[in-house]
Amino acid sequence: MTDMWDEPGYEEWESRVRDRVVPMLADTAVTVGLIPCGEIDIKFALELGLSIMMDKPIIALVQPGMNIPNGLASVAAEIVEVDIAHDSDAAQRSITEAIGRILHTDGHHVSLEDIDDED
C-alpha cells in the first residue's frame, strides 16, 4: 500500500485546494455547514478542518434528532437544529440568528448576502 501523498494526481489536487478552497474560506467571516449523515463527506471534512485551522467560527447545522460527534460539538461556535426540508423559513431564521450572534450584530438582521462582506 502506498502513501496517498505519493499517489499520481495528489499535487494537482493539493494545488486546487490551495488555489480555490483556501481563498474562499479566507474571504468568509463564518463557516456554515450542514452536517452530513451517514457516509463521511470528504469535501465537508476538508472544509471543516480548514475552517478550524483558519480559526473561523463554525455554525454546524444538524437535522432534528441527529447525533452530533463530540469533536464537532467541541469546535462548533453554534449548533443549530434545522429542518430545511419541512420548514425552510424557520431554518433560515435560525441560521440568520446564529450568524448574528457569531458576528455580534446585536439583533440586527443579517442576510446571507451580507456574510461575505463582514471581514
Image: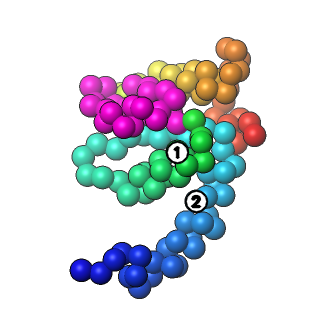
Picture residue at 75% right of the left edge, 40% below the top: 119
Q: What x and y, as percent, mark residue 51?
A: 54, 47
Q: Residues within 10 Å of mark 2 (few under 14, many from 20)?
A: some
| Residue range corresponding to the magenta coloring | 58-81
Relative side of 117 to 85, left or right: right
Q: In the displayed structure, would residue 57 be above or below residue 51? A: above
Q: In the displayed structure, would residue 11 be above or below residue 104? A: below
The answer to whether residue 74 is magenta is yes
Kind of residue indicated by mark 2? Val
The answer to whether residue 111 is magenta is no
Q: In the displayed structure, would residue 1 be above or below residue 53? A: below
Q: Quadrant of residue 80?
A: top left
Kind of residue indicated by mark 1? Ile
Residue underneath mark 1: 52
Residue 88 at least partly seen? no
Residue underneath mark 2: 21
Q: What x and y, as percent, mark residue 41?
A: 35, 54
Q: Quadrant of residue 79?
A: top left
Secondary structure found at label 2 = helix
Picture residue at 33% right of the left edge, 33% below the top: 70
Secondary structure found at label 1 = helix
Give the CA separation, mark 2 to mark 1. Answer: 14 Å
Q: Quadrant of residue 112?
A: top right
Q: What x and y, as percent, mark residue 12?
A: 52, 79
